[in-house]
Amino acid sequence: MSKRLLITSRAWFAVVAMSTAMVGAALTQSVAASAALAPDLGGNDATMALSVNPTSAPIGGTIVFTATTGNASAVPQTGAQVTFTVPTGVLSITSVVGSGWTCDTVGGTITCTNMTVVPADSDFPSIVLTTKRIAHGDATVTASVGTLQGQIDSVSANNTDSATVTEVTPTPSAGVEGVSTPQPGPGVLAVTGYNPWPAIGIAVALIVGGSLILVRFRRRA
């Protein structure tokens, strides 16, 4: 009797072990198949593109930077934060505006926040930063974007962009600005640019004519 119970117990444990192995294999195959069929959504992917117009300007010139941030991921993105870094020693900040954006300026740092929900593969409204050149030299403005509310940006390489404006150097001039200085040529006075020969010719003609009239008058007398 005991031998039969022992054999029955061994058989039962073998069946349980086999059943467990079969269930585990089936679950593993099911998970693998589901992973293969499901899309890889990943996290958010905020992008930044910064442009400048014009690319060169003299002192006193107006320079406009346009920042466009987008959601390049396959899932919606809730909000974004953009930070500008402006070299205030060369450029003064005139204004910063953008639909749905709230911006704060502290020195040369501007922080703009937008809480709009942007669908996958879409852009936020652009931010327009207007500046004025106040000093000599090139000036580079940097803009970077980050996600909000604990969202994870899966790609950080495209979060920052920069744009540089160069200086327009005025052409040197020895005369008054905007007025060309005459270059002396043959018979032209170097200081005034005046040609004396026409006047000299008229004076000679008057002298010769006067002399002829005087000669004729004396003969008649």
Image (cartoon, rainbow, N blue to C red):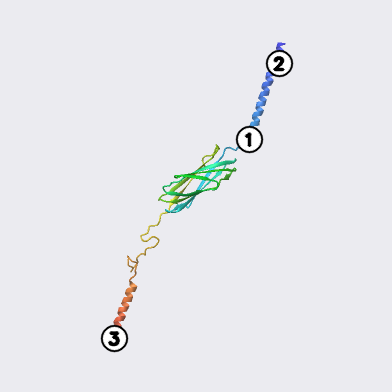
- Image point (65%, 27%), residue name: 25
Of pointers 2 and 3, the one earlier in the residue sequence: 2
- Image point (28%, 83%), residue name: 214
Q: CA distance from mark 2 to mark 1?
A: 42 Å
Percent x, y of residue 52: 49, 50
Percent x, y of residue 182: 37, 65
Q: Amino acid at mark 2?
A: Thr
Disc 2 versus disc 3: nearer the observer: 3
Disc 3 versus disc 1: nearer the observer: 3
Q: Is residue 79 left or right of residue 108?
A: right
- Image point (54%, 42%), residue name: 80
Secondary element at tag 3: helix
Residue 128: tell me if it is visible: no
Q: Amino acid at mark 1?
A: Ala
Of pointers 2 and 1, the one earlier in the residue sequence: 2
Percent x, y of residue 75: 60, 40
- Reading the image, the residue beneath label 3 is 217
Q: Which image quadrant is residue 180 in? A: bottom left
Percent x, y of residue 188: 33, 68
Q: CA distance from mark 2 to mark 3?
A: 167 Å
Of pointers 3 and 1, the one earlier in the residue sequence: 1
Residue 36: image tag: 1
Residue 8: image tag: 2
Q: Amino acid at mark 3?
A: Phe
Q: CA distance from mark 3 to mark 1?
A: 126 Å
Packing grade of label 3 (10 A; few <14, some 14-19, many >=20) is few
